């Protein structure tokens, strides 16, 4: 993974004896990127804001799909009362998705846009913190190295479908990208993750 | 209402103000349930004021407990219990403004921003040269803690401390934490003289002592919640420096002050700080809390003054000023800190004074504690450099004033 310094990199330079980032590192780095994009969106206007939101929408889709496919099922199995913990997280995700669907394609000049973006930010960041505290904390303790590695592979496969780093170039479509079908992106991410298991 | 200006000079005599009667100060659950600040929208200095007042309220509560434990008069103990319960409610309201969505490390960085900009302000305003030196000495150490935690923050949470301190406070090395471990005997300063020192000096000592004490307790409690070995160790090391700082600042206070006198000083200080923060608060909702608490504290001060008049040989008017000193402000102190870095980075303490040489007692402590292995505050920077290729700093006003502490000199 080659994150830029701007949004906080998870990847150490290779070959220096430092451990590779594990799945928790990757997900926490994505949370940090999501948080930074919210900050950027709040500070920008017009076309620029539209682009940032498009990137945010895509990153959220990739991130949440990877979690649903590869992380939550693992958490269900390995952490005590894992099913209940994961159900709470899915409930939060569904609430955020409803806001996301309303925001998707909305004009930044729409008077409803800013309050909605603010609500989404609060929901998503609260959800991310809950995951870190009640779910991710357990993964490193309870999972085998092989389980952690498989989950990390899935997260990387998801990222490869729709690169989540800034300046990846994919968001140049602006409004087209934002209005683009997030659901189909999620489907492609899901396919890629399932493919990573076979590979 | 509470303040009035005469010829441009604001006069405010808390001893003459009418507060809220004590029997009307109790708040119910609904009133205690304050909505938290939004961490992405908050003015960093609003967060600093919240953290400061939490430390002040915690000190108020624990001072009252200690007083009660040393008091034989049952009626006084009951009055203290009444005051203390309200102080405890104030602490709940103030500290519960902190957002749960913030991580422990984000709050920690807020604590260190308080330590830097609060202590720097106090150092600038302190009239007594010996006390001023104590704050100048201490602030360079907290400044270094901010830099160490900021590097940990980027490593474990992948975000940058500038998102929290917002460019108001620079992030770069201060007096390196590894050199802050001194023989405990050298942390004891000489106290001011309660009869001759300026009342403002008493408020300063109480304020900085309370803030450092809260910081120490916070690190003691949250440090072990981390799983990352470097995070656990960093909180341990800096937590031990906070123990030194509490010793350093509490020893400035004249131990000859009577319990009654101390109670008045505590209540007066709370009035002073709530008054100060009411004056400068940018968030209207938070300002309303400062103003409400000021009105409560005015009554606490009245009760404390009455107790002093009944039980002490002196009058409260003899120990506090009749008009409030200049308000305490949170504001950037970048140039002041840079000057101190340039001139005082290599100081340490010997006895109650300050020296530049690494004397025997200092060297012995260093040897026993640090030994052959680099301490956690050094390793956190090394690990950050290994992982990101450089260390985290935020120098808005040019290169580090000390050439040896510039990043390219390493």
Image: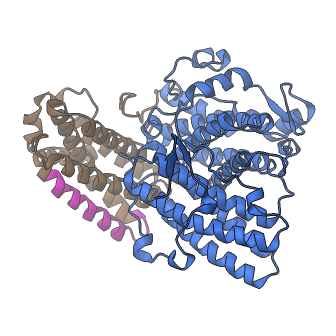
Q: In terms of depth relative to the viewer, which is nearer, B385 or B257?
A: B257
The x and y percentages for residue B115 are 61, 43
Magenta region, residue range: A78-101
Q: Residue at x 69, y 45 (%)?
A: B237
Asked which quadrant contains residue B329, the reply is top right
At 24% across and 35% down in the image, what residue appears?
Answer: A160
In the rendered image, residue A44, in percent from the top left (x then y), is placed at 23, 34
- Farthest residue, direction front: B7
Q: Position of residue A42 (x, y in %)?
A: 26, 40
Q: Is residue B390 left or right of residue B284?
A: right
- Residue A27 at what x, y percent from top left? 36, 46
Residue at image position (31%, 44%) is A155
User: Residue lying farthest right?
Assistant: B360
**Does the stretch in magenta take in B112?**
no
In the image, is residue A83 part of the stretch drawn in magenta? yes
Q: Determine whether B140 is above or below A118 in the image.
A: above
Quadrant in which residue B101 is drawn: bottom left
**Chain in brown?**
A
Q: Which of B129 and A198 lies nearest the eye of the viewer?
A: B129
Whether A4 is drawn above or below B280: the answer is above
Q: Is residue A48 rendered to the left or right of residue B222?
A: left
Quadrant housing the C terminus of chain B: top right
Chain colored blue: B
Q: Quick check: can you spot residue B225?
A: no
Q: Is residue B169 visible?
A: yes
Residue nearer the viewer, B382 or B58: B58
Q: Nearer the viewer, residue A161 or A118?
A: A118
- The relative height of residue A123 versus residue B201 in the rendered view (above or below) is below
Q: Residue at x 12, y 47 (%)?
A: A111
The chosen color scheme is by chain
């Amino acid at each position: 993974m080659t994150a830029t310094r701007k949004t906080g990199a998870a990847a150490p330079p290779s070959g220096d004896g430092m451990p590779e980032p594990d799945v928790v590192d990757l997900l926490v780095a994505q949370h940090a990127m999501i948080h930074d994009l919210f900050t950027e969106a709040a500070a920008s206007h017009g076309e620029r804001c539209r682009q940032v939101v498009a990137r945010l929408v895509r990153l959220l889709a990739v991130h949440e799909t990877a979690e649903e496919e590869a992380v939550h099922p693992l958490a269900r199995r390995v952490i005590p009362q894992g099913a209940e913990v994961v159900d709470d997280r899915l409930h939060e995700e569904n609430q955020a998705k409803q806001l996301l669907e309303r925001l998707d394609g909305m004009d930044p000049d729409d008077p409803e846009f800013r309050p909605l973006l603010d609500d989404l930010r609060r929901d998503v960041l609260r959800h991310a913190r809950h995951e870190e505290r009640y779910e991710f904390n357990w993964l490193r303790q309870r999972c085998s190295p092989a389980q952690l590695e498989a989950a990390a592979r899935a997260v990387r496969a998801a990222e490869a479908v729709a690169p989540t780093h800034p300046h990846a170039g994919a968001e140049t479509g602006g409004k087209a990208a934002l209005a683009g079908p997030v659901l189909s992106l999620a489907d492609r991410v899901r396919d890629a993750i399932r493919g990573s298991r076979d590979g | 209402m509470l303040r009035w200006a005469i010829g441009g000079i604001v006069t405010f005599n808390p001893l003459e103000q009418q507060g809220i009667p004590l029997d009307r100060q109790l708040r119910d659950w609904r009133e205690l349930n304050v909505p938290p600040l939004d961490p992405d929208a908050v003015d960093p200095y609003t967060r600093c004021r919240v953290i400061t007042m939490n430390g002040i309220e915690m000190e108020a509560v624990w001072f009252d407990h200690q007083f009660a434990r040393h008091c034989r008069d049952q009626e006084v103990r009951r009055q203290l219990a009444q005051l203390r319960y309200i102080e405890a409610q104030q602490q709940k309201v103030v500290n519960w403004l902190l957002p749960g969505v913030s991580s422990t490390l984000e709050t920690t960085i807020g604590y260190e921003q308080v330590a830097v900009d609060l202590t720097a302000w106090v150092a600038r305003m302190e009239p007594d040269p010996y006390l001023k030196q104590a704050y100048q000495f201490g602030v360079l150490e907290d400044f270094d803690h901010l830099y160490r935690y900021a590097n940990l923050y980027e490593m474990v949470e992948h975000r940058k401390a500038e998102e929290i301190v917002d460019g108001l406070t620079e992030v770069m090395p201060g007096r390196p934490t590894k050199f802050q471990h001194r023989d405990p005997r050298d942390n004891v300063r000489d106290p001011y003289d309660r009869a001759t020192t300026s009342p403002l000096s008493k408020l300063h000592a109480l304020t900085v002592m309370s803030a450092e004490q809260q910081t120490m307790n916070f690190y003691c409690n949250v440090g072990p919640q981390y799983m990352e070995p470097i995070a656990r160790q960093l909180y341990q090391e800096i937590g031990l420096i906070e123990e030194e700082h509490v010793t350093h600042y509490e020893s400035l206070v004249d131990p000859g002050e009577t319990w009654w006198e101390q109670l008045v000083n505590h209540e007066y200080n709370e009035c002073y700080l709530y008054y100060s923060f009411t004056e400068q608060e940018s968030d209207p909702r938070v300002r309303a809390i400062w103003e409400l608490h000021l009105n409560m504290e005015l009554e606490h001060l009245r009760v404390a003054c009455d107790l002093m008049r009944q039980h002490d040989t002196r009058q409260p008017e003899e120990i506090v000023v009749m008009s409030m000193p200049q308000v305490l402000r949170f504001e950037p102190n970048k140039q002041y800190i840079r000057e101190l870095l340039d001139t005082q980075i290599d100081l340490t303490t010997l006895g109650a004074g300050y020296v530049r040489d690494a004397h025997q007692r200092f060297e012995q402590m260093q040897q026993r504690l640090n030994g052959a292995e680099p301490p956690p505050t050094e390793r956190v920077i090394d690990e950050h450099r290994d992982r990101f290729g450089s260390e985290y700093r935020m120098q808005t006003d040019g290169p580090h004033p000390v050439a040896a502490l510039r990043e390219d000199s390493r």
